[in-house]
Amino acid sequence: MTLVQATDLHYLSQRLTDNGPAFERAVLHGDGKIALRIEELAEGFTEDICRMKPEFLIYSGDLSYNGETESHKDLIRKLHRMETAGTKVLVIPGNHDMESPRAKTYQEEKVLPAATPTKEEFFELYRSFGYDQAESRAPDSFSYAFSAGENLVILMLDANSVHFNTLSDETLAWAEEQLKKASKVGRKVLGVTHENLFAHSDLISRNFRLENADALRKLYLKYGVHCNLSGHIHLQHIQTEDGITEAATGALSVGHLSYAVLNWDGSVLTYQKQPVSGHEDLHREAEQIFPSSSYKMARAVLEQDSSLNGEEKDRASSLFAEMNTAYFQGDPMDLSGREQELNILKSAGGQLGPFTSSIARDLNKKIDNQNAVIRL
Ligand SMILES: [Fe+2]
C-alpha cells in the first residue's frame, strides 16, 4: 500500500491576491515559501497525486496560507480531483487553518482582512476528508482514527483546535482508547500530528514541539507505536528516540517542494522524500529563495563586525546560506575544508553563532533525513 504525506503547503486562493506590491512585501518578509507561485505548485502536486494514485494522501496541516476561507475552498476542489482519481485524502488542521486574524487579501498596495472559518465551518469544509468515514472521532478536537485496512490504523491527532500546539486531555484520553483497541487485536498504528513529537533542532524546537509531547510519547511507548509523521517546522528531519521514529516532513512550499512517499507491506513502512515532479523553473526559483534569504540574514549580522573585511563577510554568509539550505532540505553536506568561514559564523553575534553551531552539529551526524525503514 502506498501513502503520501504532504504538509505545510500554505495555499493561498488566487482570488485573494493579485501578486502585486502588497503581497510581494508580505512574501519578502516571510520564511522562504514560494508563495507567489503557489497555484502552479498546488497544481503540480495535484497532478502528481492523480498520476501516482496512492491509496492515501495524509495532509498534516497548514493547508492554507493564513486560514482564509477562500483558500480552503479552492484547495478542496483539488483534493476532490485527487479523490476522483482514486486517492483517499485525510486531513488535520495546522495552526494556520481556522479562526485566524492573519487571514488577509492582497490587492495592489492594500492588505485587507479576509474571511476565516470558525471551527464549525472548518469541519463542514473538510468533513469528507477523513471525518465522515473515521472509525472514531475525538469528542472535542479534530482528531480521528482511520482504518487503512485490516492491520493498520492511521491516528490523526489535532493539537490546534482546542489549545495552540497542545493535545487536549480529552483527546489524549480518546487516543489511548484507540491505541488500546488496536493493540488488543494486533493492529499497527501510524501516528500523525502537525507539530512535532520530538525536538528536531537544539535551538528552534520551542513552539514546534508539542507542548505536551511527553504525554503522547508515553502513550506511544505503552502501546508500541513506532512511527509519527509531522510537519510545521518546515525542516526535513528524521529522528529516532526509544524505538519511535518521527519523520518531520519539510514544507511542500519551501526548497525542494517535496512530500513523503511511504510504502507499507504489512509490517515495514518505508519513507522516502520526493520533490514535486517536473516544473523545473518552479524548482529553480524555490531553490534560490531560501538560500538568498539565509545569505541576507547572515550578512546583516556579520556587517556589525568591523574586524571582518567584505570578502570574509561574503564567504561566511555564502557558507551559511549553503548550510541552512542543506539543513532545512535534509540534504547531506560535507563541512571539511570550510573551517575558516565556519569559525567566523560560530563566533558571530545574536542567534547566528549558536544557530550555526547547532546546524553544523546536525550536518556532521551524517544521518539520512530523507529515507527511513520503520518496523511498525
Ligand atoms: Fe504550522
Image (tube, rainbow, N blue to C red):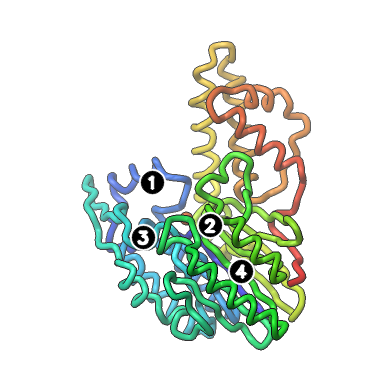
At label 1, the amino acid type is Val
Q: Are marks 1 and 2 in contact (CB under 8 Å)?
A: no
**Viewer-nearest of discs 4 and 1:** 4
> In the rendered image, which residue does mark 1 sit on?
27
Q: Distance between the Cα atoms at labels 1 and 2?
A: 23 Å
Disc ID at residue 195 = 2
Decide if ligand 1 comes within 8 Å of the CB at mark 2: yes
Q: Distance between the Cα atoms at labels 2 and 4?
A: 12 Å
Residue 35 or 216: which is nearer the viewer?
A: 216
* Residue at (23, 54) in percent of width and height: 113
Q: Which of disc 2 and disc 3 is earlier in sequence?
A: 3
Query: If the image is split into quadrants, where does the C terminus sit?
Result: bottom right
Q: Are marks 3 and 2 in contact (CB under 8 Å)?
A: no
* Residue at (41, 53) in percent of width and height: 35
At label 2, the amino acid type is Glu
- The outermost residue toward the top is 307
At label 4, the amino acid type is Gly
At label 3, the amino acid type is Leu
Q: Which of disc 1 and disc 4 is earlier in sequence?
A: 1
**Viewer-nearest of discs 1 and 2:** 2
Q: Distance between the Cα atoms at labels 1 and 3?
A: 12 Å
